Image: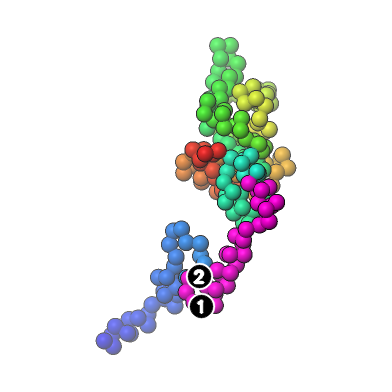
Amino acid sequence: MGDRFDRLKLRHANVEALLRRPGIGHNNGPTFDMSWEAWVWRRAAAKAWKTPSPEIAKMRVRRAERLGITYKELTASLMNTGANLGTAVMPLSLAARVRRGPNREVIVEARNSVAALVAKFGGRLFLLGDIDAVPALSDEERAAFLSVVNRAFDGKVEAVGWGHDGKAIRTMLRSNAVPHQEAFLIGAGMSHQVLGDSAGLPFTKDIEGWFA
């Protein structure tokens, strides 16, 4: 018995805290017991999610509908960043197929399901083009690419950036005077989730749930 307690003395000083570390999905709040910390946490959470005035609620609902996201996603982003969402970033490969025509001209073909969703979108829409996924473009073709894209999307695309990582997204947003806190990514799958996270965007909206 004594030997066992002697061995316990050798444990790391923070072992108890490590063993009690919350798992995946935990929001790092205190456990819901009757302690003072738990009471303060519950009070703060209730205040944050308190129903706003009808005018503000209606305004948020309308904005969420224009962006194709839920009221809860819009409100959570506002509480986390203090910024209103208004811009969506979408990978070009998800939005359209880019190919060369018979005369080597650049052709952009919108994916039908995505084109219908873009038509509903009421915010600022940016596309991120992966250089490796697009037929080699000259400087002139890249400069004219936005107008080519907008033929397929009825002028809904405001800007096109080039790259394949979060830095490219931040650069595109910055060059168009859009704080990254005001933009969200529309994607499909874990790779796009990682892309949005690396850009520091508030969240990534799966395209299957966009305007659902």
Tag in front: 2 or 1? 1
Specify start and end residues of the magenta stretch as a single range: 32-61
Badge 1: how crowded within 10 Å, few (<14), some, or many (20+)?
few
SS for callout 2: loop
- In the rendered image, residue 112, in percent from the top left (x then y), is placed at 52, 25
Looking at the picture, tell me which residue is in the foreground, 175 or 139. Answer: 175
- Quadrant housing the N terminus: bottom left
- The image quadrant that residue 126 belongs to is top right
Q: Is residue 106 above or below residue 198?
A: above
SS for callout 1: loop
Q: Name the residue type under label 1.
A: Ser
Give the alpha-carbon distance from disc 2 to disc 1, as whole Å. 9 Å
Q: Is the magenta stretch mostly helix, strand or loop?
A: helix
Q: Residue furthest left?
A: 1
* Residue plotted at (32% across, 85% down): 5
Mark 2 — residue?
Answer: 30
Q: Is residue 207 above or below residue 145?
A: below
Mark 1 — residue?
Answer: 35
* Residue plotted at (62% across, 44% down): 64
Q: Residue furthest top?
A: 103
